[in-house]
Amino acid sequence: MVESTVFRKVVLKKKQQQTGLAARYEAFCRRQEKQTMVWYLIPLMSLPAVVMPISIMAMSYFTGFIAFIALSILLFYTNIVLTVAERPVKTRITFYLFTVLVHIVIPLAAFLLTLFS
């Protein structure tokens, strides 16, 4: 009599800790610590090439255009100065995301204000 033995593959999964958004962001920033040049080049290339032209063009149709350009230039150069001052990568990433958020929220708010007034 021939017996066949079937082995079941048992996969033990390590229970992952429940992490919030802030903890995952901290972990991401820690993983990016060695890539300082990348976080210098991302704001240097993406802000003036993609983010700023679109938002400045959108703001040209609304009031506060000159103030927005001044704020936009200030935020751009602050991103560059953070790298020159050798701030931690977490600070650079946070300020870059803040800059992108400002360039999205202010034109959107100006559009909604003119739309509903």
Image (cartoon, grey):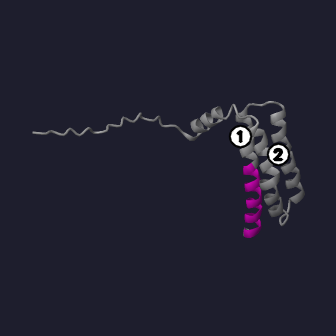
Give the residue type at disc 2: Leu
Q: Residue at x 80, y 48 (%)?
A: 45
Q: Which mark is residue 94?
A: 1
Q: 10 Å neighbourhood of mark 1: few (<14), some, or many (≥20)?
A: few
Q: 10 Å neighbourhood of mark 2: few (<14), some, or many (≥20)?
A: many
The answer to whether residue 12 is above or below residue 68 is above
SS at circle 2: helix
Q: Residue furthest left?
A: 1
Residue holding disc 2: 75
The reply to whether dot 1 and dot 2 touch (C-beta < 8 Å) is no
SS at circle 1: helix
Which is nearer the N-term, disc 1 or disc 2?
2
Q: What x and y, as percent, mark residue 94?
A: 71, 40
Q: What x and y, as percent, mark residue 102?
A: 75, 51
**Viewer-proximal residue among 72 and 83:** 83
Q: Main secondary structure of the magenta part?
A: helix
Give the residue type at disc 1: Thr
Q: Residue at x 48, y 37 (%)?
A: 18
Residue 117 in view here: no
Which quadrant holds residue 20? top right
Q: Which residues fall within the magenta stretch? A: 100-115
Q: Residue at x 45, y 35 (%)?
A: 16
Label 1, label 2: how far apart the Cα atoms are: 12 Å
For the C terminus, the quadrant is bottom right
* Magenta region includes residue 77: no
The answer to whether residue 60 is above or below residue 50 is below
**Viewer-proximal residue among 78 and 49:** 49
Which quadrant holds residue 49? bottom right
For the N terminus, the quadrant is top left
